[in-house]
Amino acid sequence: MSENAVWSNLSALAALAGVMAYALFGGADFGGGVWDLFACGERKRDQRLAIQRAMGPVWEANHVWLILVIVVLFTCFPRGYAALGIALFIPFHLALLGIMLRGASFVFRSYQSRQKDAAAETSAWGIVFGVASIISPVLLGIAFGVVTEGSIRVLDGEVVFLRDDVWVSPYCLANGLLALSTCAYLAAVYLTNETEGPLREDFRWRAIFAGMSTALLALVVLVLAWSQAKSFFDRLLTWRTLPIVLVGIGCFAGSAWAMVDRRFALARAFAAGEIVLLLLGWAVAQYPYLVYPDVPFHDVAAPVATLRFVVLSLPVGAAMIGPSLWFLMKAFKAK
């Protein structure tokens, strides 16, 4: 393997690690906004306060992982990033708009009145927060579907779509709904570890409901992938990818069992493992393409000196960001 291939592989692994971290933490934040919007029952106020306490310390810090992915892509794979940036311009910018609306509405709702715990009350800013929490993961899921479907082509340096309705194909829309359901599931599982008593039971039932919808939507996505994203579906069934996907499915089943049996810490560990393994399976199936089938990331990698600098600087950044996030959680979540 050439030096360029080694460093481009390491750069791609760094971007994948950022995607995994964003799915685990940022995805749960999106899901928290979903459950905030659909808070109901006699403990509606307590549910929103629990979500606020869980998200409060890191409600925007989790987007650092998205920034990491973007920086690694445009630094290490500039031509590939340009192709993705052109192809995904509309959904990605709408998703970013949703992220900004989430952040602004979360703050405005908290200070909309002098009443203590005003964020627990139903309000216009609370609705904006919840709706934006739905829109962003759906759009990111649709973008994921477009990339894996093979509808983006880069021909003679020009980005073209194979169909005019690429964003609203059944496969892409199903991926958007699956991303939303997965975020809701993660948030509910995490919140069972943040609450106690009847409030914990509220989120337990939400986790069970979201888990069933996630399993159903995953099945729909697989069926649609077989018919509309055949090349990606076939790569999922190869010897190097299928074991990873099966173990990920096993983690999902373990998380569901642990949630039904009220083993909340175990459910959280299994849910996190499921996300990591399924994203790893996608990455292995996608390898070596950044945009299938025209853009192998080795062909669009930056010079080796740039790749080496980025890869070697990431541990330094992690050594600063990791303890900072830990201290943030320790300081603000202490009782």
Image (cartoon, grey):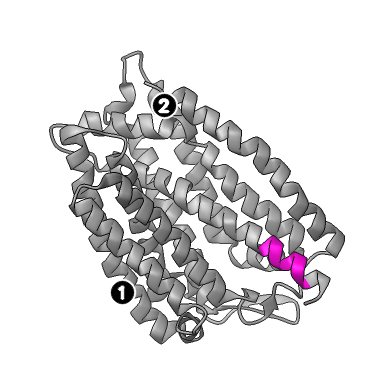
Q: Is mark 2 on a helix, strand or loop?
A: loop
Q: What element carries label 1?
A: helix
Measuring 41% from the left and 52% from the top, which residue is drawn there? 135
| Label 2 packing within 10 angstroms: few (<14), some (14-19), many (20+) | some
Q: Which residue is at the front of the view, 181 or 130?
A: 181
Q: Is residue 269 visible?
A: yes
* Part of the protein shown in magenta: 5-12
Measuring 17% from the left and 33% from the top, which residue is drawn there? 197
Q: Earlier in the sequence, mark 1 or mark 2?
A: 1
Relative image position of residue 221 (x, y in whole percent)? 36, 74
Residue behind mark 1: 219
Q: Main secondary structure of the magenta part?
A: helix
Residue behind mark 2: 333
Q: In this view, does 61 lie to the left or right of 85?
A: left
Mark 1 → mark 2, Cα distance in angstroms: 37 Å
Measuring 61% from the left and 68% from the top, which residue is drawn there? 87
